[in-house]
Amino acid sequence: MAAQQEGAGLSAHTVARWAIVVPASVVLGWLFSLWHVPAAWILAAILSSGAMALFTGEDLRVNRSFYSMSRGFIGMMAAIPLTVVPVGQLLGFLPAALTISFVTLMVGVIGGQLLHRAQPDDVSSETGILSMLPGGASIMPALADELGADFRYVALTQYLRLLVVSVSLPAVVALLDTPAGEGADLSVDGETTWWIVALVIAIAFIGEKVGSFLHLPAAAVLGPLLLTVLVSFLLPEGHTLEPLYVFKVMAFLSIGWVCGGGLSLPALKAFAKQLPATVLFIVVIIGICAATAWPLTKWLHISYFEAYLATSPGALETVLALSAEGGAGPAVIAVQLTRLIAVLVVAGYLPQLLRLAKRLLRR
C-alpha cells in the first residue's frame, strides 16, 4: 500500500501521465458535480487515474506529503458536524443511537467476514469489514490504506453503496409523510479569514504527527479530526474550521487518484468476482437499516421519515439536505453522528478488535 503514496519521480513519462490525469479529473469532477453524481470528485479521479493505470500497465503514484495533507482535510471534514451539534442534544438521543449503531455495525462486520470467507485469497477480514461498514465512505479508503487493507476494493464497494443509497433516498422519502417542522440546522457558515485558512492548513499538515504521537489508529485521519474538534472550542464566535472548497476538492481527488492509480486487471477481476455478493450485502444493509427505523419511531417518538433518514447507511450530505427540506428534528443528526463516531472507532481499531475476537474464539 505504501508504494501508492511514494513520491513519483519527475520523469517526462510521469509528468505526461499527470498532465492528462489532473485536467481530466477536474473536468469530469466539474461535470459530475453539475449532474449531481454522488461522490463526484472522487469518482472522477478514480475513473481518470484508473484509466491511465490500466492503459499504461503501471501504477500512478501519488506524492506522500500531498496525500498525507489530503487525508488531513478528510479528517477535518468528518469532524465539522461534531463541532456544530450541541453535546446535550447528542446525549439525549445516545441510548437509542448507540443501539441502532450497534445493529448496523454488526451487520457490516458480519457481511465483511462473509465476504472474506467467500474469497479468502482476494478479500482479507479487514478489507471485507471496511467495505461493508455503513457510513464514512470518503474516510474508509484512507483508513484502509492506513490499516493495510485493499483500499481499491474498499473504495469501489463503499462508493457503490453510496451511489445506491444516494439515488434511492429521495425516491423513498418522497413516499413518506414529513413532520413539516423546522429542520435541524447543521450549518457551518462562518467568516473565512487568512488566519483561519492558515490554521486549517496547519491542522491538516500536523494532524498525522499529533495522531502518531498520541498513538491513535489511522493517525492521518483521526489526528486531524481530534485536533479540529478541540481547536473549534477555542475559536471566536462566527468562525469555523470548515476547509475551503478547493481543499475539499483536493482531498477528494487525492483519495480517488490513490484508489484508481492502483487499479489493474487482476484487481478489477477480483472485484467483479465479488460483485454479486457485494451488491447483495449492500441491499441487505439498506433493508436492515430501514427495518431498524420502525422501533426507533416508538423509542424517540419521531416520524418514520425522520427515523428512515436517521438510519440511512451513508450519504450524509443527501440525508442532511432531505432532513432540512422535510422539517426533520434533531434525532436525524444525533443518530447519524453517533454512528459515524462508532464507525470511526471500529474502523480505527479494527486490527486490534479482530485479534481480540480470534483470542476469545480460541477459548
Image (tube, helix red, strand yellow):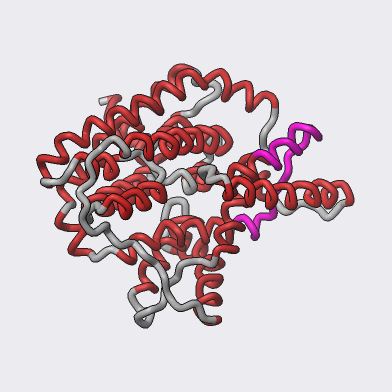
Comparing 145 with 240, the one in front is 240
Please report the residue visible at 57 percent of the width from the left and 49 percent of the height from the top.
Answer: 33
Q: In the rendered picture of this protein, how many numbered marks are placed on residues?
A: 0
Comparing 76 with 320, the one in front is 320
Comparing 210 with 50, the one in front is 50
Q: Position of residue 137 (x, y in %)?
A: 46, 43
Q: Quadrant of the N terminus?
A: top right
Please report the residue visible at 53 percent of the width from the left and 46 percent of the height from the top.
Answer: 36
Prevailing secondary structure class for the magenta stretch in the rendered image: helix
Residue 40 visible, this orientation: yes
Please report the residue visible at 67 percent of the width from the left and 34 percent of the height from the top.
Answer: 263
Above or below, 205 against 26 in this view is below
Q: Quadrant of the C terminus?
A: top left
Q: What span is in magenta? A: 47-67
Above or below, 199 against 316 in this view is below
Q: Position of residue 314 (x, y in %)?
A: 39, 42
Above or below, 122 against 301 in this view is above
In the picture provided, is 138 more to the left or to the right than 13? left
Q: Is residue 51 magenta?
A: yes
Q: Is residue 236 magenta?
A: no
In the picture provided, is 224 more to the left or to the right than 332? right
The image quadrant of residue 85 is bottom left
